[in-house]
Image: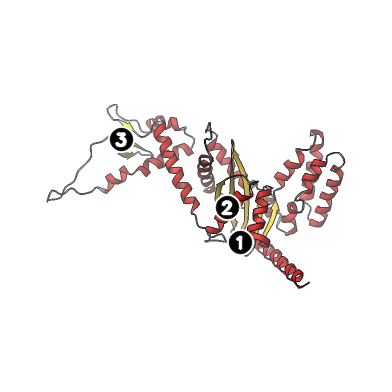
Amino acid sequence: MAVRGAGGEVRGLAVRRPRLVDAAGKELPLECYAELQNPETLNSTALRKVIVGVAQRGVNGDLEQDQPLPEEQRAYGASKSSVSRRWIAATEGTLAAQAERRLDDRRYLAILLDGKGFADHLLLAAMGIDEQGRKHVLGVWEGGSENAEVCGAALEDLGRRGLDVSGGVLVVLDGGKGLAAAVRTHWGDVAIVARCRVHKTRNVIKHLPKGEQRWVRAALWQAWHEADPGQAERDLRQLVAELEPKWPAAAASLREGLAETLTCQALGLPLELAQALGSTNLIENAFATTESICHRVCRWRSGSQARRWATMALLKAERGFAPVTSPAAMAALAAAVAHCVAERAQAQELAAAD
């Protein structure tokens, strides 16, 4: 039977089963006893202990310290193997619930998509920002952002759960080619794509000798903080020209997707919001929470294991998410997105008329 301690922790204890009979001698069920037998109470304990940093092999000792028992009392269900089984059951339940989480209860004005590696296993995560500026974990899937098939399946899953982007949406990508292709295929002109500047900087800098990296970083930063998007693009193309003779790989990296690194400036977003949506750092910061929980895993056996751990950690991080910005700034984003989508539709009508 599972017994709850003062701190809410639960472990199995061997006790004599209480019995209650009516006047006719018929045994009556005891709801409190049935609840204590519920394995979910033990699973939730394993979940809380592992999330706060207790190693699976240390849960039994941690409970013993919190709830010392008399020598004659026998406890069970908190060994390393038991905790491992309970952790798997708890995370599988959480993953299943997340996979069916409805997305039609609010409008998402921005969606960030980024990949994360767990040893040899790659995951793709999506975060949405609603009209109030609040962040929500939309999903985690096996596969990296370079795989167009996986990315397409992820976007289809979001649609199946009710995500509506028909009014337009800003999509911030990590730069994976498969992800960009999937977004354009599935969402077309209603998706306004912005490339992550942090990923772009990394990709450019890795092609440069160390002595040249500082000034290139400064030039990128200056262009991406230029108020006039036209001038910002001219500055970046001038940087491409300067890099081309000696470091053509760096120039090619900057040239690829250059205009999409200026999307937030082109939309005329408020500075605070433009900086927040100029990269996928909002997801990467959430993934930092997964590092604090997942670093104890010595070996990732499968992508499904990594997905369970990552989903659990991201949902834990979600509970502490602060709003990205004010509803007023998000209203400015909504207006800018709607204007951009309308311009694209008008351009298509003119092209069709010609």
Tell me if I can see residue 124 in this picture. yes
Task: Give the quarter of the figure containing the N terminus.
Answer: top left
* Residue 262 in the figure: left or right of residue 71: right
- Name the secondary structure under disc 2: helix
Going by the numbered disc 2, the residue's amino acid type is Ala
Image location (x, y in percent) of residue 227: 78, 55
Residue at the limit of the structure toward the front, as seen here: 149
Rendering coords of residue 61 (x, y %) = 40, 29
Give the alpha-carbon distance from disc 1 to disc 2, as whole Å: 16 Å
Which residue lies under the disc numbered 2?
Answer: 153
In depth, the one of 132 and 98 nearer the eye is 98
First in residue order: circle 3 vs circle 1: 3
| Quadrant of the snapshot with the C terminus | bottom right
Q: Are marks 2 and 3 in contact (CB under 8 Å)?
A: no
Tag shown at residue 254? none
Of circles 1 and 2, the one toward us is 2
Q: Amino acid at mark 3?
A: Leu
- Which residue is drawn at the image coordinates 64% and 50% (left, top)? 148
Neighbourhood count class around disc 2 (C-alpha, 10 Å): few under 14, some 14–19, many 20 upward: some
The CA span between labels 3 and 1 is 52 Å
| Distance CA(mark 2)–CA(mark 3) | 46 Å
Q: Amino acid at mark 1?
A: Val
| Residue drawn at (44%, 30%) of the image | 57
The dot on residue 13 is 3
How far across and how far down the image is residue 239, in percent?
84, 46
Q: Residue at x 76, y 39 (%)?
A: 205
Q: Horizontal and vertical percent for residue 43? A: 40, 41
Query: Disc 3 or disc 1, which is closer to the eye?
Result: 1
Mark seen at residue 165 = 1
Q: Secondary structure at mark 3?
A: strand
